[in-house]
Image: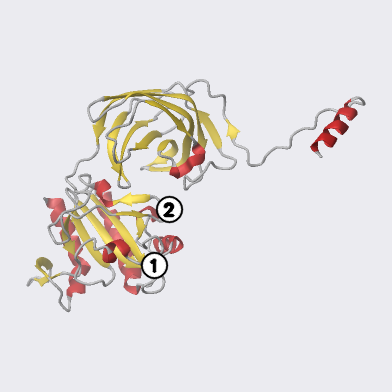
Amino acid sequence: MKHIAFSICCLALTIGCGPAEEPEDPNAIVHEGTCDEAGFAIDMGKAVFGRRGGKRYVGYVAEGSGSRYDKIEFVSYLYDDENTLAVGSYVLSADDGNGANEVLRAYRDCEDDVCNEVYQASGTLKIEASGEVGDQFTARLDNVTFEQMEDDGSEPKRNGSTFCGSAVRWDAPIESNVLGECLTDGEGLEKGDKLRDLVLPNCYGDMISVHDNCGHVKAQVLVLTASWCSACRTRLPATEALIQQYKDQNASVEAYYILGQGSQPGAPATMQECFGDAQTKSIDPARMLVDNGGGRVGFNEMFRRGFATLCDSGLPNYIVLDGDDMSFDFASRCHVSQTDDGVWREDQWGPQDNRAAAGAGGYTLAIEQLLDD
């Protein structure tokens, strides 16, 4: 059929027929120029060896004040048998989205670490020198185009824009952002033990590791919750307001909310319920984590696989970790002692009829004690 249409068009040319115009693609990416030079200035950045989502990585980050982006970040995750990123050429593709092992992204319209536009690179990154912490990291971008991504970073955005990132060079010593003394496998489940790493997806599907904050915060709070939990509907918004108050005061605190069950007791939570819970409780979906055993088992990591020894499985259940080494510092349903002034203390570790009331305010005391250390 294609051959017949071509013959008819050729015959029509003898009587003045011209080539048909291609219709405009409403989903086409709008290009801002060719990609044969940098197209923007680059500020000096830093090379980093770190942890993210429970994985080790080598990367590079730079601010972009006065240029075509606010921040640029490269991350290459290391395999278990690797200690550094090998020298060589790495092919980048925006089509890989969040699933890419080597990810180079630029961010625009950023304020207070929140960026409204995300761009992912396609092209070649050439690593010229690498190594371990203290070694020099040198790389350059070759024929790289940054493509605007969907908000969730999954794929290039329809009707998005692009900009060029070629001929840019990076050169900086590798620093480490691994500060704490955490143990990936932990050393036990009891109070005082360094707990193992806990890696769970958030509402966006990004893998979040509790140990990523090791050494970067003084206190880390984990709040176990479920969609069906009526007490959680009032307690969690108050908890999140308190956490935000700490952050506004530059206190070194982070909190994650672990959704282990959905709208029915015992049923594992879905990703849709994750977003719904985050919205109704005024919690950032990036800090609402889903513990559903891959959709099969509610609270799989927390209870079935025994993340920590808790006095009961009631909800909400608060756990406070020492951010320096992720040691088990407080559990809301275990601290039961009350002094004459009515303040709950962590003098006793065991169940009692009023243990839930103790935990209602006890976790704030645990946070304060860690901040004062």
- Location of residue 360 by image quarter: bottom left
| Closer mark to the observer between disc 2 and disc 1 | 1
Residue at image location 25% in from the left, 67% down from the top: 317
Q: Amino acid at mark 2?
A: Tyr
Can residue 300 be seen by looking at this rendering?
yes
109 displayed left or right of 21:
left
Residue, disc 2: 204
- The local crowd at label 2, few if under 14, some if 14 to 19, many if 20 or more residues have their Cα within 10 Å, is some
On-image quarter of the N terminus: top right
Contact (Cβ within 8 Å) of mark 2 with mark 1: no
Q: Choose between 166 and 125: the one closer to the eye.
A: 125
Image mark count: 2
- Location of residue 11 by image quarter: top right
User: How far apart are the two marked residues, 2 and 1, measured between alpha carbons?
Assistant: 17 Å
Q: Upstream in the sequence, badge 2 or badge 1?
A: 2
Residue at image location 26% in from the left, 29% down from the top: 174
Query: Relative to 259, is 68 above or below?
Result: above
Q: Which mark is residue 337?
A: none
Query: Relative to 81, is 240 above or below?
Result: below
Q: Residue 77, image x and y in percent? A: 35, 39
- Location of residue 6 by image quarter: top right
Can residue 238 be seen by looking at this rendering?
no
SS assignment at label 1: loop
363 displayed left or right of 27:
left
SS assignment at label 2: loop
Residue, disc 1: 268
Q: Amino acid at mark 1?
A: Pro
Q: Residue 372, image x and y in percent? A: 12, 51
Residue at image location 73% in from the left, 37% down from the top: 23
Colour theme: secondary structure
Residue sitting at the far bottom: 353
Query: Relative to 293, is 10 above or below?
Result: above
